[in-house]
Amino acid sequence: MTPRIDVPAEPSPFPIVAGKTALILIDMQRDFLLPGGFGESLGNDVSQLLKVVPPLATLLAAARAAGVMVVHTREGHQPDLSDCPPAKLSRGAPSKRIGDPGRYGRILIRGEYGHDIVDELAPIDGEIVIDKPGKGAFYATELSTVLTEAGITQLLITGVTTEVCVHTTTREANDRGYECLVVSDCVGSYFPEFQRIGLEMVKAQGGIFGWVAASAAVIPALSHLTTIPT
Ligand code: TIU
């Protein structure tokens, strides 16, 4: 029998299954999170995202201790912008567009300091890093193949921003047959009302495209996973 633990979640308990569960950290990149970075330069309140880092670091440590697969994503583009659609490139204020020089290097360009993940959540050996050109982590990436080959069916979804890349990825995953738990204090939005409504939308209508629970409910389940004899 596959060891399985039900996490108390809304709208119903969410099954975490040993060997079939992955933790996904979406776009916890300096460009989105750090003061003086791209996100703040657009007028956003980065403190709303920075508060996600401590609980997510704790959840990440618990996942690592439980042997759960960890996948990090980064939104960004090739230095020549060949993978950035004109409709995305032309968005935003002049001089603050993708590829322009920013405080932490060229904005959202692969290889630049700002494009990489914040130090507190840096990937370690053995963890997957998916570079994605879009908002959804399945679009134009190898994520689907990676998860299929690993036999993953359950996703613990975290990262930023709740209503943009977290929602897009969760919706993509749900359509592909994954069961998705969005961890409420480990996702963040620049806009408090989008955070609240974004989480409501996931779990409405009997869990229309996912489940929602706080990390305080997920972590004990992960700890228990390590104690189940296989
Ligand atoms: N990762 C992600 O959500 N990308 C964004 O551009 N989000 C914004 O909210 N701008």
Image (spheres, rainbow, N blue to C red):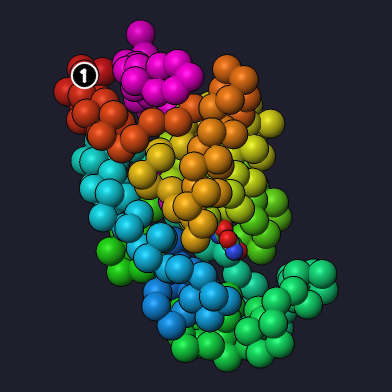
Q: In this rendering, would 14 be left or right of 144? A: left
Q: Looking at the image, which is closer to me, 9 or 140?
A: 9
Q: In this rendering, would 60 be left or right of 192? A: left
Q: Looking at the image, which is closer to me, 47 or 121?
A: 47
Tell me the element at label 1.
loop
Q: Quadrant of residue 46?
A: bottom left
Residue at 26 percent across and 26 percent down: it is 221
Which residue is denoted by mark 1 in the rendering?
A: 228
Q: Quadrant of residue 66?
A: top left
Q: Give the quarter of the figure containing the N terminus.
A: top left
On the image, the x and y values in percent for residue 70 come to 39, 46
Label 1 crowd bin: few (<14), some (14–19), many (20+), radius 10 Å: few
Q: Give the quarter of the figure containing the C terminus.
A: top left
On the image, the x and y values in percent for residue 223 come to 20, 30
Q: How many marks?
A: 1
Vertical side of 34 occupied by 223: above or below: above
On the image, the x and y values in percent for residue 124 come to 31, 59
On the image, the x and y values in percent for residue 192 come to 47, 52
Vertical side of 76 occupied by 132: above or below: above
| Residues rendered magenta in the picture | 1-25
